[in-house]
Amino acid sequence: MSSPNVIVAGIRGRMGRQIAQLVLHSQQLTLGGGTVRADDDLAGSSISMTDADDRAQDVPVTATVAEFNGLPDAVIDFTCPDYTIALLDDCVPRKIAMVIGTTGFTPEQEDRIRQAAEKIAIVKAGNMSLGINLLTLLVEQAAAALGPGYDIEIHEAHHRHKKDAPSGTALMLGEAAARGRGVTLKDKAVYAREGQTGERPDGAIGFSVTRAGGIVGEHEVLLGSDEEVISLSHKALDRAVFARGAVTAAGWIAGREPGLYSMRDVLGL
Ligand SMILES: NC(=O)C1=CN([C@@H]2O[C@H](COP(=O)(O)OP(=O)(O)OC[C@H]3O[C@@H](n4cnc5c(N)ncnc54)[C@H](OP(=O)(O)O)[C@@H]3O)[C@@H](O)[C@H]2O)C=CC1
Ligand SMILES: O=C(O)C1=N[C@H](C(=O)O)C[C@H](O)C1
């Protein structure tokens, strides 16, 4: 396949901007353009970006994927849940692969994504960094080895603009801990505590959340007994770590068979 053509959804967003820049600088991918809201002044025009040779490039911007001349091979989506679901309606009939980094989906929206993945190839991960995807393996292993006598608590901290909680990453870590224990996260998760909560239920997987300033993304999984506490943690220092993962995933997914893939599939972990 020639260099896959990629559209970046939400190209003006914190992640969209970084991803578009990386795709433009990539030797393996071509940047076909980006999308913005229909009422955005940029819809139907272009933005100027610099390529790897420091030359200015006009990157086309539209409100929908369907408006681009020539269909892309993949769409990278870091936007918001409703828009991701709208993108599926554009991508499924056109057989365009997707990389979904957006977080905060409802169970019904998760079902829609699973159904779409029967028709197109989708990589979906609440965190695209190598470090977090490795951490999910370690958490699964620790939860399995330590057993239910160790209480599991997951804490996450993010910037003040984040709209969903707990983070997609915290949920991935919770799923990993539940897998390690052989239980279902839905049955064990405790997402909020206030007032007369009673004692901690046996086997609970607890979540807590901080929102402050410009924190890029911090996650910690505690496994605690009466005698010791083990802490497994990750701190993202720069959004580039997520953008790099997304761009790797786009190169990997283009031309693949339909299916719902994870970053562990992409990274071979
Ligand atoms: N999986 C991972 O590794 C990571 C995932 N994320 C997730 O990615 C998502 C985006 O994060 P971030 O970049 O910080 O958020 P931003 O708010 O900076 O960017 C979101 C972009 O999506 C656009 N958008 C939202 N709704 C629509 C719509 N209906 N039509 C067109 N464009 C739309 C926004 O446009 P407008 O500004 O006009 O609203 C904005 O440009 C979040 O869900 C976040 O949790 C973030 C980092 C890493
Ligand atoms: O919104 C963010 O910024 C991030 N969102 C992802 C999440 O919900 O886990 C990943 C990362 O931590 C940054």
Image: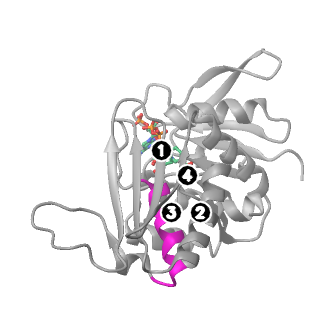
Q: Residue at x 65, y 43 (%)?
A: 7
Sequence-wise, the earlier of marks 1 and 2 is 2
Q: Nearer the viewer, mark 3 or mark 4?
A: 3
Residue type for callout 3:
Leu
Residue type for callout 2:
Thr
In the rendered image, which residue does mark 3 sit on? 173
Ligand 1: does it lie within 8 Å of the C-beta at label 4?
A: yes
Magenta region: 167-183
Residue 192, compared with residue 240, is above or below; it is below
* SS category of the residue bearing label 3: helix
Sequence-wise, the earlier of marks 2 and 3 is 2
Label 1, label 3: how far apart the Cα atoms are: 12 Å
Colour mode of the rendering: one colour
Residue type for callout 4:
Gly
- Is residue 57 or residue 239 the one in the foreground? 239
In the rendered image, which residue does mark 4 sit on? 101
Query: Would you say the residues marked 3 and 4 are in contact, meaning their CB atoms lie under 8 Å apart?
Result: no
x, y percent for residue 94: 66, 60
Pointer 4: residues within 10 angstroms few (<14), some, or many (20+)? Answer: many
Task: Report whether 88 appears left or right of 214.
Answer: right
